[in-house]
C-alpha cells in the first residue's frame, strides 16, 4: 500500500464525517446472540474474532446485494466477477473461496463442484436480521470446509403482518459498446414480498427480479430469486422452521475464466436449497435441534454462447445432509454435542460422475463459572469416504480484566476437502484437476484485546495460521494448463485492528464511525515466485476500511471507503456513498459507487464498474389485524 493512498484514505474520512449515515435502528450489539449450531453466545461473551453486520448497517451501506455489503467487512475479500451481485468469490484473511463456509441460519451452502457458487443466495437484504462473520478456523463449530472462517446469515423473525416493495435502477451513463445495441449501460431491480404473523405460525416470502445490460461488452445479466421461510409453534417447548430458496442467474461471462478468448461466453446458474429445522426443549436442562437440508446446483457454462456444439460445460450437483445438535445447561457450564451426515454427488460433462459421503461428530464445553474467565473447549471428529478419519480440536479463552478491558486467546484446527473441480476437472488446454490431492488442514493461534466504554469500542490482535497441503492452481509456463496442486505449507501472519464509535448527539441526531485495518503476510507467495499461481498471488496484503454515518431527523448520510493492496502489488481505493430519506413506511435513497472512478480488477479479467449512480425506493406497510 503506497503512503499516498493510505494518507488519502485516512484524510478522506474526516472530511465526510458530517455527510454520513448512522442508523436509527436501536440494535445493541452486546445483546446480540451469536448463533452457533449448539450454543447461542452473547456477542460480548465470545472469545473468538466475531464481527456482525446489523440491520442498520445493511440499511445504510450504499449497496443493494449481499455480495456488495460484505465488501465493507474487515478481513473479508469479496472478489466479484459479475457486477451487481451476479457472481463473486469470498475469502477470509487470505484464504481462498473454497476455504470459507457460508451458512443461512446455520444451514451450510457449500457446493461440492466449486466455491464460485458459494454466494448464490436467494435472500434480499430486507429479510436479513444480521450477518455474523467468524474469522479463523471454524470446523469445531460448523464442520469441514470452514478452514479460514465462516459467514452466517441470520434472517429476521416475523412479528407483524406486512407487505414490501423495493425498486431500484442505476447507470454509469456510458454508451453501450456492442454493435447491435444502443443507449447507455444500466441495471434495475424489483423486490416484492411480505410477512404473515399468526399466533401459532409465521411466514415470509420475497421475490426478486434484476436486469442489466452490463457495464461493458457482454456483461449483461438477468437474475431471479425467490425466498420463503416459516416458523410453526407446536407448543411452548417445540417448534419447526422450514426454508426454501431458488435462484436463476443468466449473465455474460466476458473475462470470467479464460480471457481473452471467452469474450462471447455466457453462464446460466440455477440453485435450489431447502431445509427443515426443529427445536425441542426436552426438560429444564436438555435442548435438541435436528435438521435436514438439500441443495441442488446447475451450472451451464457456454464458451461460445452462439455455438453450443463446442466449449460447453454442464455440471449438476446434489448435496443432502442431516444434523442433530444438543446441549445441556448446568451451573458449571454448557455441554454441546452434535452429529452430521452429508452426501455429495456431481454429474458433469468435463468432471464426470462422482459421489462421496461425510460423517462428523461435535463435542464442546463452554463455561463462565470461574470468575472473570470464559472458555470454550471442544473438538470435531470427521470421517470422509475419500479422506478417512481426522480430528480437529480447539480452545478459546477470555479474561475480563475489568468492566472495559478483555483479553482473548484461541487455538484451533480445521479442514477443507478438495472440490470435485480440484480433483477431476478435464478442461484442456485451460485447466485440469488432480485426483491425488490431499485435504487441507489448518492450525491457527490468535491473541487479541478489546476495550469498550460508552460509545467507544477498540479491538486489535494478531494471528498465525499454518495451512498444510495448501491447494492452488499452478503452472510453470503459459504453454501448460493450470493444475490443482498441494503446494505445501502456507504460513500466514496477520494483524487486525478496529475502532468503532457510536454517539447519540441529540434525540434525533446520531453519528457512527468505524475504521478497520488488516495486514496479512502469507509465506506461500514468497516461496513460489517462479510459478504462475492462479488465485493465491492475488490475496490481500493490506486492507483498510472506513465507514462513517450521520443521521439528522429523517435524513441519513453515509460513506464507505476501501483501500486494498494485494500480494501482486495491485492496489486500489474505492469510495461509495448513500443519501437517504425515510418517513413512516417508505424510504428513498440514492447511491454513488466508485465516486472517484477507480479502475480495478478483483478477479479474472473483469474490470469492475466505473462510477455508478443508483436511485431506489423502499416501501413496507405494516398491516394490522
Image: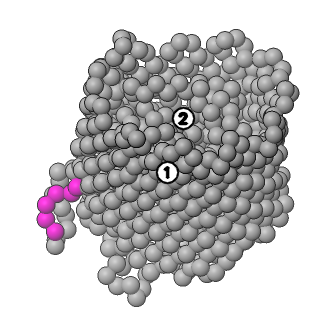
Q: Quick one: quadrant of the N terminus? A: top left
- Depth check: give the residue in front, 599 or 508: 508
Q: Quick one: quadrant of the C terminus? A: top left
Distance between the Cα atoms at labels 1 and 2? 25 Å
Q: Residue at x 33, y 59 (%)?
A: 209
Q: Up-down: is 430 above or below 90? A: below
Q: Up-down: is 130 above or below 534? A: above
Quarter where residue 439 is shown = bottom right
**Which residue range is magenta in the image?**
181-186
Q: Taking the image as drawn, is residue 619 in sight? A: yes
Q: In this image, 354 relative to 602: left or right?
A: right
Q: Up-down: is 120 above or below 577? A: below
Q: Is residue 563 rendered magenta in the image?
A: no
Mark 2, other Cα within 10 Å: few <14 / some 14–19 / many ≥20: some
Identify the residue under disc 1: 203
Q: Is mark 2 on a helix, strand or loop?
A: strand
x, y percentage for residue 293? 63, 61
- Depth check: give the residue in front, 475 or 572: 572
Quarter where residue 149 is shown = top right
Q: Indicate the colouring scheme.
A: one colour
Identify the residue under disc 2: 52
- Depth check: give the residue in front, 358 or 234: 234
Q: Which residue is drawn at 45% across and 68% down?
A: 269
Q: How many labels does the image show?
A: 2
Q: Taking the image as drawn, is residue 65 in sight? A: no
x, y percentage for residue 22? 38, 25
Q: Residue at x 31, y 82 (%)?
A: 306
x, y percentage for residue 114? 57, 64
x, y percentage for residue 328? 82, 38
- Depth check: give the residue in front, 406 or 362: 362
Amino acid at each position: 500500500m503506497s503512503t499516498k493512498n493510505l494518507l488519502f484514505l485516512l484524510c478522506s474520512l474526516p472530511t465526510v464525517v458530517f455527510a454520513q449515515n448512522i442508523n436509527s435502528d436501536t440494535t445493541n450489539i452486546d445483546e446480540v446472540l451469536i448463533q452457533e449450531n449448539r450454543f447461542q453466545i452473547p456477542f460480548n461473551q465470545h472469545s473468538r474474532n466475531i464481527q456482525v453486520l446489523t440491520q442498520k448497517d445493511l440499511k445504510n451501506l450504499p449497496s443493494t446485494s449481499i455480495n456488495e455489503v460484505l465488501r465493507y467487512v474487515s478481513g473479508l475479500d469479496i472478489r466479484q466477477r459479475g457486477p451487481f451481485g451476479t457472481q463473486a468469490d469470498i475469502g477470509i484473511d487470505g484464504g481462498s473461496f473454497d476455504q470459507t463456509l457460508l451458512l443461512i441460519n446455520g444451514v451450510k451452502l457449500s457446493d461440492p463442484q466449486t466455491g464460485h457458487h458459494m454466494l448464490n443466495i436467494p435472500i434480499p437484504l430486507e429479510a436479513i436480521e444480521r450477518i455474523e462473520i467468524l474469522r479463523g478456523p471454524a470446523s469445531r463449530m460448523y464442520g469441514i470446509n470452514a478452514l479460514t472462517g465462516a459467514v452466517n446469515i441470520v434472517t429476521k423473525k416475523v412479528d407483524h403482518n406486512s407487505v414490501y416493495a423495493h425498486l431500484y435502477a442505476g447507470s454509469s451513463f456510458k454508451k453501450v459498446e456492442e454493435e447491435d445495441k444502443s443507449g447507455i449501460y444500466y441495471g434495475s431491480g424489483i423486490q416484492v414480498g411480505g410477512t404473515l404473523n399468526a399466533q401459532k405460525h409465521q411466514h415470509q416470502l420475497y421475490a426478486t427480479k434484476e436486469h442489466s445490460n452490463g457495464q461493458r461488452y457482454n456483461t449483461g445479466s438477468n437474475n431471479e430469486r425467490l425466498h420463503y421461510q416459516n416458523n410453526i409453534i407446536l407448543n411452548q417447548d417445540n417448534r419447526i422452521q422450514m426454508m426454501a430458496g431458488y435462484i436463476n442467474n443468466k449473465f455474460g461471462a466476458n473475462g470470467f475464466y479464460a480471457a481473452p478468448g471467452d469474450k462471447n461466453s455466457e453462464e446460466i446458474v440455477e440453485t435450489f436449497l431447502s431445509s427443515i429445522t426443529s427445536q425441542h426443549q426436552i426438560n429444564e436442562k436438555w435442548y435438541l435441534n435436528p435438521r435436514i437440508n438439500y441443495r441442488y446446483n446447475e451450472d451451464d457454462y457456454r464458451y461460445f454462447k452462439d455455438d453450443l456444439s463446442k466449449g460447453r460445460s454442464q455440471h449438476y450437483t446434489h448435496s443432502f445432509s442431516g444434523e442433530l445438535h444438543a446441549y445441556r445447561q448446568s451451573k458449571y457450564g454448557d455441554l454441546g454435542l452434535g452429529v452430521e451426515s452429508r452426501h455429495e454427488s456431481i454429474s458433469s460433462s468435463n468432471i464426470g460422475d462422482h459421489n462421496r459421503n461425510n460423517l462428523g461428530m461435535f463435542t464442546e464445553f463452554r463455561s463462565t463459572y470461574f470468575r472473570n474467565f470464559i472458555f470454550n473447549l471442544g473438538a470435531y471428529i470427521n470421517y470422509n469416504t475419500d479422506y478417512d478419519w481426522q480430528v480437529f480440536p480447539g480452545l478459546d479463552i477470555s479474561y475480563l480484566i475489568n468492566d472495559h478491558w478483555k483479553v482473548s486467546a484461541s487455538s484451533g484446527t480445521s479442514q477443507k476437502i478438495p472440490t470435485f473441480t480440484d480433483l477431476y476437472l478435464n478442461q484442456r488446454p485451460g485447466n485440469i484437476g488432480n485426483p491425488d490431492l490431499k485435504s487441507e488442514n489448518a492450525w491457527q493461534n490468535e491473541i487479541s484485546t478489546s476495550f469498550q466504554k460508552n460509545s467507544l469500542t477498540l479491538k486489535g490482535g494478531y494471528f498465525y495460521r499454518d495451512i498444510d497441503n495448501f491447494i492452488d492452481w499452478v503452472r510453470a509456463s503459459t504453454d501448460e494448463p493450470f493444475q490443482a496442486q498441494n503446494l505445501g505449507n502456507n504460513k500466514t501472519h496477520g494483524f487486525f485492528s478496529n475502532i468503532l464509535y457510536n454517539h447519540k448527539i441529540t434525540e434525533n441526531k446520531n453519528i457512527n464511525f468505524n475504521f478497520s485495518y488488516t495486514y496479512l503476510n502469507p509465506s506461500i507467495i514468497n516461496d513460489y515466485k517462479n510459478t504462475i499461481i492462479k488465485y493465491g498471488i492475488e490475496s490481500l496484503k493490506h486492507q483498510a476500511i472506513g465507514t462513517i454515518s450521520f443521521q439528522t431527523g429523517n435524513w441519513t448520510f453515509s460513506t464507505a471507503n476501501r483501500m486494498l493492496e494485494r500480494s501482486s502489488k495491485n492496489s486500489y481505493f474505492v469510495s461509495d456513498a448513500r443519501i437517504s430519506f425515510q418517513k413512516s413506511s417508505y424510504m428513498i435513497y440514492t447511491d454513488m459507487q466508485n465516486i472517484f472512478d477507480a479502475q480495478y480488477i478483483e478477479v479474472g479479467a473483469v474490470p469492475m464498474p466505473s462510477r455508478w449512480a443508483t436511485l431506489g425506493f423502499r416501501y413496507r406497510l405494516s398491516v394490522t389485524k
